[in-house]
Image: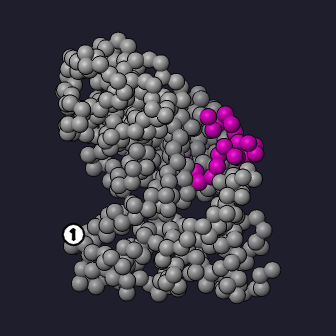
Amino acid sequence: MKANCWVEYSGEIADDLKTQITAALAAEGIVTTADGADAGSLGLHFVAPPLEDGRLRFRRDTDHVIAVVLASSGLSETEGWSLLRAGAADVIYWSDPGRVASQIKARIQRKLSIDRLFEQSVLGDVVVGNSRQWRSLLRDIVETAHFGDSSVLLMGESGTGKEVTARLIHELDPRPQKRDMVILDCSTIVPELSGSEFFGHERGAFTGAFSDRQGAFALADGGTLFLDEVGELPLALQAQLLRVIQEHSYKRVGGTTWHRTRFRLVCATNRDLVEMVEQGTFRADLYFRIAGFVTRLPPLRERTEDIIPLAHYFIRRMSGSKRPPVLDDAVCRYLMERNYPGNIRDLQQVIARLMYRCAEDGIISIGYVPRNERPTDLTRLQDWPDDVFETLVQRAVLLGVGLKEIGRAAEDCAIRCATRLENGSLQKAAQRLGVTDRALQIRRANTRDLPDRRIGEVRPIN
C-alpha cells in the first residue's frame, strides 16, 4: 500500500527524530510531506508532551487526522482523552518505530477501505448530509457493518432513519451467500401469535394452524433479523428471544425438533432502554445481548445543515426522469426554520406536498406551501433572543435538573401557552407551534399533567 500524508508537529521535536519518523513511515509505503505542505486528505499529527494547557489544537481540518502519534511517553490519561476530543482518530505512543509505523499503516488502510465503501451506491438515502456529526456517525456505522458481526442497537426518534440504516448494515455485511433481511415490527405483534411470528409453528399446533409455517428465526437464518420497536416486546417474549440469541437454536410452536439459526441481529427503538432496564420493564441480560454496537441517530433539529441537502435529494428522487425544480431562497429559509417532529420522514412529506403543487416553471416558491403550514406570525421566522429563558434554564441546571426533564418542561410549557393563546383550540395551537395536529396530540399524550382531549375540542385551560 502507498499513501501520501500531510504531517503536523506540536512541541519540541528534534530534527533527527523527525527524520527517524519519516524513514519508518516510508518503509511502510507512507510518504509524508513537510509540516504545512498540502498533500491530500490523510494526516498525521506528532506531538511531544507536555501539552500546552493540557490541550491540543490542530492546525488543519480535524476530520482528516487519522492518527496522533506521541513523540514520547509521559502523557496523562486526561491529556490522552483531550487529544481524541480535539479530533484525533487515535493516540499512539512512539516507542518502537517499526511497530508504530505498522499501526499507522493499518489505520490508514482501514480509513481508505471505509472511504471506498462510501462510494458504493448501496449507501443511497443514508449518506445524504454534510454535517460533521452525521458523517462521523455514519463512518462508525459503516465500519461496524462491514468489519464486524456484532448485534446493533439503533436508538432515535421516529423518522430519523433507523430502518434505512438497518438495511445499510445488512447490505454492507460481507458474509458470502448472505440471505435476506427479515423485518419484524414488535409494536404490531399480537401477543397470542407472538410465538408463531418468531418461532414458526407445526401443523395443528393451534386452531387455524393448517400447515407448517416458518417464523422469523428460520427466515433470517444466514441473513439479518431486524426487530423494529424492540422496546415494545413483552417480558415473556424477551426471555424466549434471549435464549435463541444465546444458543442459536429454537423449536417451532407445537414441535419437538430443535432447529439451528444464525443471523445478524439489528434492533431499533425510540424508547430509553436503559431507563426501562432500571424500571424492570426490559430485561438487562437481553439489553446487553442486543447492544453489541449502540448508536443514536440524531433528530433533524440536531443536524439542521442537512435539511437543504436532504430536500434536494428528495426533489431529485421524486422528479424521476424529469428535470428537478429548484427551491427559491424564501422556501429554503422556510424549510430551515420549520419544526420537524417527524424528522426526516416529516421533511420528505413536506417536499412531497410542495412537489404536488409545483408547476412546470421549474421553481418552487413560497406560494406552493400549503395554507395550513404557513407561519401565522412572521416573527416566528426571525431570530429571537437567546436569553429569553436562559436564566430559568441556568437555575434548573444549578438545581441538578436533568437535560431530559428540562426539555420536557419547556415543551409542556410551550403547549400550554399556545393552547391558551388559541382559546383551547389544539388545531390552532399546532399551527402556532409549527407542528402537525397529530404530532401535537402525541406530544400532549407524553406530558404528565395535561388531560387528553381530541384535536379541535375547545375547553378552558386551568
Residue type indicated by callout 1: Ser
Quadrant in which the N terminus is drawn: top left
Residue at x 63%, y 63% (from the top left corner): 390
Question: Is residue 285 found inside the magenta-colored segment of the image?
Answer: yes
> Who is closer to the viewer here, 230 or 131?
131
Q: Quadrant of residue 418?
A: bottom right
Residue 355 pos. (x, y %): 34, 77
Eyeballing the image, is 149 above or below 73?
Answer: below
The quarter of the displayed image where residue 27 is located: top left
Compared to 302, does 223 lie above or below? Answer: above
Can you tell which quarter of the image residue 322 is in?
Answer: bottom left
Task: Tell me, yes or no, whether the highlighted magenta stretch contains residue 194.
Answer: no
Residue toward you, 31 or 258: 31
Question: Residue, x 20% and y 20% (percent of image)?
Answer: 26
Q: Which residue is mark 1?
A: 321
Residue displayed at 21% across by 69% down: 321
Would residue 426 be found to the left or right of residue 352 on screen? right
x then y, percent, for residue 309? 34, 62
Residue shown at 44% from the left, 84% from the top = 370
Q: Which residues are magenta?
A: 268-288
Apparent side of residue 321 relative to residue 344 in the rendered image (left or right)? left
Secondary structure, mark 1, is loop
The location of residue 153, given as percent across then percent down, is 54, 43
